[in-house]
């Protein structure tokens, strides 16, 4: 008896579009602690994988480098405790450049800040990578809270 081992199986749908039987996806988190700067965008230290279907998330660089070209949706949640700024900004970065920011609101009674955002980003399936960044918009450093970063393939190229 012969055996066929494959990593990905592509089929053709009735419309001729390729379909992937298992969609690549990941969920990763950072549980809190450590310092966030107040003036420079800093990569969020997402270092714990909850789920990673293809092992494409790197917990040492905090980035996702998928090996299938296509459009990916990324979702991020950032929480930070910062003493003085009125808000922080967070962004998805592709290959070291911002792909769009979302702002994190502040709870004035506790100086805790939380926000979430999502973005669809095209990745080439070989070298493109995405990371979650954040920075405070004030004069004081803060502390990371619980942060989440997740993504999945919406449509292959």
Image (cartoon, rainbow, N blue to C red):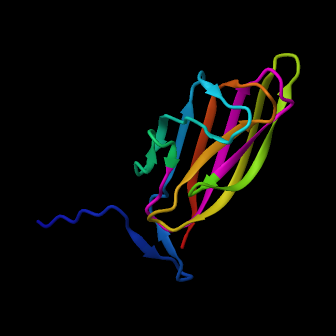
Q: Is residue 78 magenta?
A: yes
Residue 120 versus residue 55 in the image, above or below: below
State which quadrant residue 147 falls in.
top right
- Residue nearer the viewer, 144 or 66: 144
State which quadrant residue 116 falls in.
top right
Instruction: Locate residue 8 relative to residue 133 in the image: left or right.
Output: left
Residue 151, given in percent of the width and then of the height, sits at: 58, 50
Residue 15, given in percent of the width and then of the height, sits at: 57, 82
Residue at 53% across, 38% down = 28
Instruction: Locate residue 1 relative to residue 93 in the image: left or right.
Output: left
> In which quadrant is the N terminus drawn?
bottom left
Residue 63 versus residue 70 in the image, above or below: above
Residue 94 versus residue 83 in the image, above or below: below
State which quadrant residue 58 falls in.
top left
Instruction: Locate residue 42 relative to residue 137 in the image: left or right.
Output: left
- Residue nearer the viewer, 49 or 79: 79
> In which quadrant is the C terminus drawn?
bottom right
The residue range painted magenta reads 64-92
Residue at 71% across, 27% down = 80
Q: Main secondary structure of the magenta part?
A: strand
- Residue nearer the viewer, 125 or 52: 125
Residue 37, given in percent of the width and then of the height, sits at: 68, 31
Residue at 76% across, 31% down = 114
Q: Is residue 69 magenta?
A: yes
């Amino acid at each position: 008896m012969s055996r066929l081992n494959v990593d990905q199986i592509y089929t053709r749908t009735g419309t001729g579009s390729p379909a992937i039987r298992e969609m690549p996806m990941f969920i990763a988190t950072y549980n809190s602690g450590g310092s966030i700067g107040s003036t420079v965008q800093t990569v969020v230290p997402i270092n714990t994988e909850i789920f990673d279907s293809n092992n494409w998330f790197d917990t040492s660089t905090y980035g996702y480098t998928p090996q299938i070209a296509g459009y990916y949706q990324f979702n991020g949640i950032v929480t930070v405790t910062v003493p003085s700024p009125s808000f922080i900004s967070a962004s998805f970065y592709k290959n070291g450049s911002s792909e769009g920011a979302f702002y994190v609101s502040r709870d004035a009674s506790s100086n805790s800040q939380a926000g979430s955002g999502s973005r669809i980003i095209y990745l080439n399936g070989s070298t493109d990578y995405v990371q979650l960044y954040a920075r405070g918009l004030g004069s004081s450093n803060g502390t990371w809270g619980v942060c989440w970063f997740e993504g999945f393939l919406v449509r292959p190229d």
